[in-house]
Amino acid sequence: MSIIDIAARGAAQQVEAAGEAGATGEVEAVAAIAQVVAAVERTQRAKDAEGFLALFHPEALWTTAHGKVLIGFDAIAEFTRAVLPATSWDGDVTYEVVHTQFLRPDVAAVKVRQVYRSVAGDTEGAPLYVMTRQDDGRWLLTACQNTQVHTG
């Protein structure tokens, strides 16, 4: 079973456990959204800028964990291509969907737990992804805020 299958199964269980899965379409949407979050994890681990960029809506906006605001695909692409391949860390990163709230059937607010694990200690992020379903059924990142969690 792939990481995408595990994420999709976990997200579907999350919706069912919360008693929110009234319709099969919603369970399928949550599973598809979880697959996108798993792809974020996979592309971040691989430092795959192009794979990461394929997850974005053409008119997306993104705010990084350090507050840099990127408006539009071109700005996100320029930043990602410059930063992601050059990023160095000595550990691992995981992304977990912790909550999915449908604002409309084709728009979802997705709360994610992001953990960077390293020998120096773990750090955490709390991204919020607003995702939109396209006419072809794909879910894309449309408005995203990555927030670094400070402890202490």
Image: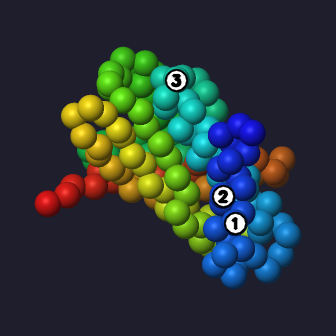
- Residue found at x 39% / y 56%: 126
The secondary structure type at the circle numbered 3 is helix
Q: Give yes or no for contact between labels 2 and 1 (Cβ–Cβ under 8 Å).
A: yes
- Which residue is tagged 3? 46
| C-alpha distance separating marks 2 and 1 | 5 Å
Q: Amino acid at mark 1?
A: Gln
Residue 97, picture quadrant:
bottom right
Position of residue 43 relative to residue 28, above or below, is above
Task: Give the residue number, with chain letter if any, for mark 2.
Answer: 10
User: Where 4 sits versus 82, above or below?
Assistant: below
Q: Quadrant of residue 103?
A: bottom right
Q: Amino acid at mark 3?
A: Ala
From the image, state whether disc 3 or disc 2 is nearer to you: 2
- The numbered disc on residue 13 is 1
**Which mark identifies residue 1?**
none
Of marks 1 and 3, the one in the foreground: 1
The Cα–Cα distance between marks 3 and 2, rounded to whole angstroms, is 23 Å
Distance between mark 1 and mark 3 Cα atoms: 27 Å
Q: Percent x, y for residue 124?
A: 33, 50
43 over 23 or under it: above or below: above
Q: Residue type at mark 2: give it.
A: Gly
Question: Whole-percent x and y of residue 152?
Answer: 14, 60
| SS assignment at label 2 | helix
Q: Earlier in the sequence, mark 1 or mark 3?
A: 1
